[in-house]
Image (spheres, rainbow, N blue to C red):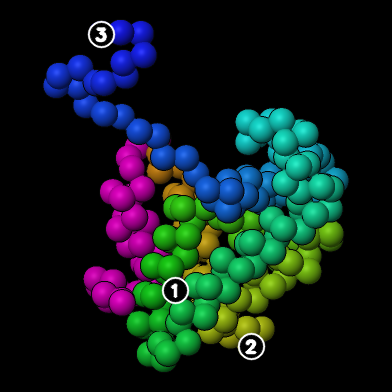
């Protein structure tokens, strides 16, 4: 074989690397930023902290999001949008039991996919610790509340169950990797959330 011959040896398995798109990179960066905001608040979430958490240089990060303010705003906007996507997907689900099942399934899938969103949705439960985050977190909490058709007039046990369900969802979504994969964890997390809402029996299948 000459120096310029790159023909694979007989029996060799060709390898290829699938690189994430620019949009996928941005989504991942914003999700990590959301998690930092949930834990640290806006003041203590620096661009350098996000760079350290994502593995990108600060310069590279600022090439995508020129200021800290734009980075924070984009991270919060993404969390609101992701929550709204789940919410709007349930517009045609009227039956309360089916709606709870669909809402749980949608939120579990989102939490397992986006850890930062999971941390931020738990931080949205009032009272919000960081007033700077309150407008966006208020939108997230309002959307989640409407998923389960709760408001200030809803009886306390129902509101307590929904809050408890969110807590269980977030803790399990953030810790399942110690035990198993997301695929194996998903039905277990759904079942825990379902029972925490006070439902008995199997979770109804949802589209």
Given residues 120 and 7, the one toward you in this image is: 7
- Vertically, is 207 above or below 180? below
Say which quadrant the C terminus sits in.
bottom left
Q: Which residue is mark 2?
A: 153
Question: Which of the two labelled residues, at mark 1 and mark 2, occupies the earlier sequence position?
Answer: 1
- Which is in the foreground here, disc 3 or disc 2? 3
Kindly identify the residue that appears in the image at 43 percent across and 68 percent down. 106
Q: Residue at x 74, y 67 (%)?
A: 136
- Which residue is at the front of the view, 19 or 203? 19
Q: Is residue 175 above or below residue 200?
A: above
What residue does disc 3 label? Answer: 1
At label 3, counting other C-alpha atoms closer than 10 Å, the crowd grade (few under 14, some 14-19, many 20 or more) is few
In the image: residue 164, left or right of residue 30? left
Magenta includes 206? yes
Q: Which residue is mark 1?
A: 103
List x then y, in percent, for residue 43: 85, 46
Specify start and end residues of the magenta stretch as a single range. 178-207
Nearer the N terminus, badge 3 or badge 2?
A: 3
Left or right, 10 with reference to 146: left
Q: Mark 1, residues whose alpha carbon is within 10 Å: few (<14), some, or many (≥20)?
A: many
């Amino acid at each position: 074989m000459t120096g310029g011959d790159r023909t694979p040896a007989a029996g060799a398995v060709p390898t290829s690397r699938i690189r994430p798109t620019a949009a996928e990179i941005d989504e991942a960066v914003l999700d990590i930023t959301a998690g930092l905001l949930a834990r640290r608040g806006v003041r203590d979430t620096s661009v350098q902290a996000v760079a350290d958490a994502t593995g990108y240089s600060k310069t590279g990060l600022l090439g995508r999001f020129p200021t800290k303010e734009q980075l924070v705003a984009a991270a919060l906007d993404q969390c609101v949008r992701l929550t709204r996507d789940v919410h709007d997907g349930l517009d045609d689900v009227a039956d309360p039991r089916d709606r709870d099942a669909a809402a749980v399934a949608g939120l579990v899938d989102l939490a397992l996919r986006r850890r930062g969103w999971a941390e931020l949705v738990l931080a949205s439960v009032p009272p919000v610790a960081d007033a700077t985050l309150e407008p966006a977190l208020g939108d997230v909490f309002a959307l989640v509340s409407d998923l389960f058709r709760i408001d200030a007039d809803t009886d306390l046990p129902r509101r307590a169950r929904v809050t408890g369900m969110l807590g269980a969802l977030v803790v399990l979504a953030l810790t399942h990797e110690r035990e198993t994969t997301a695929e194996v964890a998903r039905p277990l997390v759904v079942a825990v959330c379902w029972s925490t809402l006070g439902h008995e029996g199997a979770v109804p299948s949802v589209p």
